[in-house]
Image (tube, helix red, strand yellow):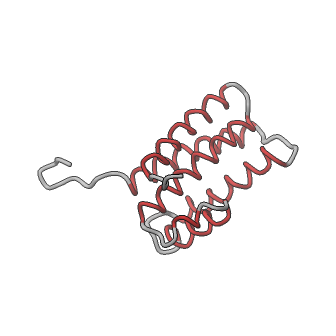
Amino acid sequence: MQAKSPSLLMGKAAQAVLSARMLLELGDVDGACNRAYYAIFDAAQAALLVAGVPSPETMGKTHRGLINAFSAYLVKDGPVSKELGRQLKRAEEMRLVADYNGESVTPADAAALVRYAELFVTSMQDLFFSRPKTPDGSG
């Protein structure tokens, strides 16, 4: 198995956001929550890799490990807002309800999670993958 690539993870995150939006429009709120969460998960993992967090191979072994690493390295003293960090945990909670709890997420909560996933993926792209402009405007 090859090492995870931040750009491939961001590509997966972008695709998962599109899938979440489509599932939501079809009325599959649980499926939309699942795809939205994995969009967030993949984008968070990509951001950690780009940021050079120590032991990147261990951070993705569990969802909790990734969430804790994201909070410790990118939220606590890093460039990611506390609100985005809190929403990562909330997204995990909603996915657990959608996938394992035997209950369905409400359509309003699913729609909010999909919007949040779109914001999260865009924010990680802007923070960790956008190249700074050079003084002449190129780059």
**Quick one: 101 or 24, which is closer to the camera?**
101
Q: Is residue 33 above or below residue 22?
A: below
In the displayed orientation, state which residue is furthest to the right. Answer: 102
> x%, y% of residue 84?
55, 58
> x%, y% of residue 52?
42, 67
Q: Is residue 39 above or below residue 132?
A: above
In the displayed orientation, state which residue is furthest to the left. Answer: 136
Q: Is residue 73 above or below residue 95?
A: below
- At x 64%, y 47%, the residue is 37
Q: Is residue 107 left or right of residue 130?
A: right
Q: Is residue 28 left or right of residue 39?
A: right
In the displayed orientation, state which residue is furthest to the front. Answer: 1
- At x 65%, y 27%, the residue is 25
Q: Is residue 27 above or below residue 118?
A: above
**Quick one: 9 or 130, which is closer to the camera?**
9
> x%, y% of residue 97?
80, 48
Report the number of discs.
Answer: 0
In the displayed orientation, state which residue is furthest to the top. Answer: 26
Q: Is residue 64 left or right of residue 100?
A: left
- At x 68%, y 64%, the residue is 64
Q: Is residue 44 left or right of residue 27?
A: left
